Amino acid sequence: MHVALIGATGNAGSRILAELTRRGHSVTAIVRNPERVPAQASVTAKKGDVFDQQGLAELLKGHDAVVSSVHFTASDPRKLIEAVRASGVKRYLVVGGAGSLEAAPGLKLIDAPDFPAEYKPEAAAGGVFLDVLRDEKELDWTFLSPSATFVPGERTGKFRLGRDQLVANEQGSSISFEDYAIALVDELEKPAHSRQRFTVGY
């Protein structure tokens, strides 16, 4: 596939870029600093601004799918969604957040008493993004939430998927950027969560 990846040099974005190229997809890496994108035959780096709706739409045109991996507090969900819609690309995958997942029946993770205060603005903005997507009628979107702990680690390919409930085990709730990237590209290649949020964890 020909995939546009917004935010290709971030923690999750760089792993998604690696996973896409590993599987033979060609990628347009849309970033603020194109010189930071590793040079590869199947990757074209383009300078883009997530707040420039018209410019972003032009960069996205002609792709089979768009993946956005950007901080929610450093972007506007409506502008991103409008840019994808204006580009004519129908498939849109979003690197989501964990805050809107249920940690217990009726309790969102962001509302749990031990949720770190410094992560609340980003988590709240991620919940807003998901709400906006759920009202979206045109795009074939998917929002993939990571686990509570989302960190660098190994590419094991061994993880579990869930829907709106936090995936956890005896050690807590976690997923590596590398395994998250596998789950996201799996979804891109074989869509199983069209117009849905799902989550991944160990």
Image (cartoon, rainbow, N blue to C red):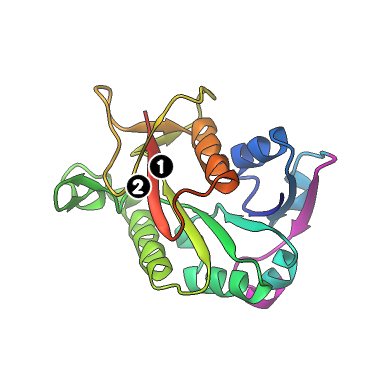
Figure quadrant of residue 200: top left
Q: Residue at x 35, y 58 (%)?
A: 121
Q: Secondary structure at mark 1?
A: loop
| Percent coordinates x, y for residue 8 in the rendering | 65, 48
Name of the residue lying farthest toward the right: 41
Magenta region:
41-55
Pointers 1 and 2 in contact (CB under 8 A)? yes
Q: Residue at x 51, y 35 (%)?
A: 177
* Above/below status of 46 relative to 22: below
Let me know if residue 51 is in the magenta part.
yes
Q: Which residue is mark 2?
A: 98
In the displayed structure image, the side of residue 34 where residue 57 appears, left or right: left
Figure quadrant of residue 165: top left
Q: Which residue is mark 1?
A: 146
Quarter containing the C terminus: top left
Kind of residue indicated by mark 1: Pro
Q: Residue at x 60, y 41 (%)?
A: 16
Q: Residue at x 55, y 52 (%)?
A: 69
The span from disc 1 to disc 2 (Cα, nearest Å) is: 6 Å
Q: Which mark is residue 28?
A: none
| Percent coordinates x, y for residue 29 in the rendering | 71, 51
Asked whether 67 or 126 is in front, the reply is 67
| Percent coordinates x, y for residue 86 in the rendering | 64, 76
| Percent coordinates x, y for residue 176 in the rendering | 47, 31
* Above/below status of 193 relative to 167: below
Asked whether 90 or 150 is in front, the reply is 90
Kind of residue indicated by mark 2: Ala
* Above/below status of 60 relative to 16: below
